[in-house]
Amino acid sequence: MAGRDSRSPRPVRSRLAPAAVRGLATLCRKLGWREAQALGRGIGHLGWWLARRDRTRTLEHLALALPEIGAADRKRLARRVFAHFGALLGECLHLSDKSCVEVERHVELEGWERVEALRAAGRQVLVVTGHCGNWELLAAAINCRGLGMAVVGRQLENPRFDALLLALRERFGTRTIQRGRPGAARELLRAVRGGSALGLLIDQDTAVEGVWVPYFGRLAFTPSGAADLALRFGLVPVPAFIERRPDGSHLARFEPPLDLPSDPTAATARMTERIEAQVRRRPEQWPWFHRRWRRQPPEPAA
């Protein structure tokens, strides 16, 4: 009998997982909004029990960032995090064959007049946000209002998942500039010089240029691209966040434009302050399982 190839399970999972998501997407498209959310929450609850590493990391990060919360409350909050991301999955799959009419049914906009005023004045908008609430729904709601925003993001490891995500964004007019791919820098430069609005998420420790800024009282390596673009090209940074409400609808809030200091590190810190404020506002709607503090700042020279 031939020896078992130790590499074979991964390709099998790589084929089965997208097939499962496609089947789930077919179901979520047929369900109503609330039903798709409920199905997703069920998947999130299942993930709480199955994803031991993410569960442990979530509890550890909550203890670091929110030490004032007791252990029992912290565990309840962590379970709500998993339920939120399950609901997010259900919402995105439900929308995968819908139009802007469906998006606008479920998203209320607050402060959108600030974006319209900037556009009327001929200013170029830089939407600064994080992985708060359903950020994909935020992008859809923005572009359903005609902003024409392009987003900068990384390519997913699984090409099938990547194709599903790009198709969802394109459905609502969101173009993705995938960093790290050939020509991405030129594409970003063309978008900036062409006057396109841009959307950047800057709340994760990823393999990009970054700086060390405070986040929940601890220095965290943070992408500096948003600050660099705003300072170099005169883009106006507008913090924007979306959150799910108890009735299943969403509120997208557009805060006043930021007046950035000229130093990129200080500018990034100011943007990060707004993200932290939103996470504190809705802590159950942020990915605490992400290794936000995985890198440590270098020791100062003696």
Image (cartoon, rainbow, N blue to C red):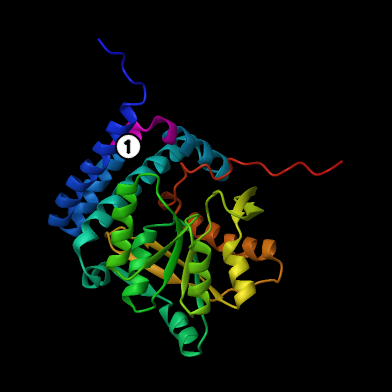
Residue 173 image position (x, y, % from top left): 32, 71
Circle 1 sits in a helix, a strand or a loop, which is it? helix
User: Vertically, is 95 above or below 46?
Assistant: below
Q: Mostly what secondary structure, the magenta segment?
A: helix
Name the side, left or right, on which 207 lies relative to 88: right
Disc 1 crowd, CA 10 A, few/some/many (<14, 14-19, 20+): some
The one of 35 and 13 positioned closer to us in this rendering: 13
Residue 217 image position (x, y, % from top left): 64, 49
Residue 239 image position (x, y, % from top left): 51, 69
Q: Residue at x 28, y 13 (%)?
A: 2
Most extreme residue toward the bottom is: 121
Residue 272 image position (x, y, % from top left): 58, 60
Q: Residue at x 31, y 17 (%)?
A: 4
Q: Quadrant of the C terminus?
A: top right
Q: Mark 1 is on which residue type? A: Gly
Q: Residue at x 49, y 84 (%)?
A: 118
Name the side, left or right, on which 212 lies relative to 72: right
Residue 259 seen from this side: no
Residue 258 seen from this side: yes
Q: Which residues are magenta?
A: 46-54
Q: Is residue 48 magenta?
A: yes
Q: Quadrant of the N terminus?
A: top left
Name the side, left or right, on which 244 lies relative to 74: left
Q: Residue at x 28, y 36 (%)?
A: 46
User: Vertically, is 122 above or below 278?
Assistant: below
| Disc 1: which residue | 47
Most extreme residue toward the right is: 302
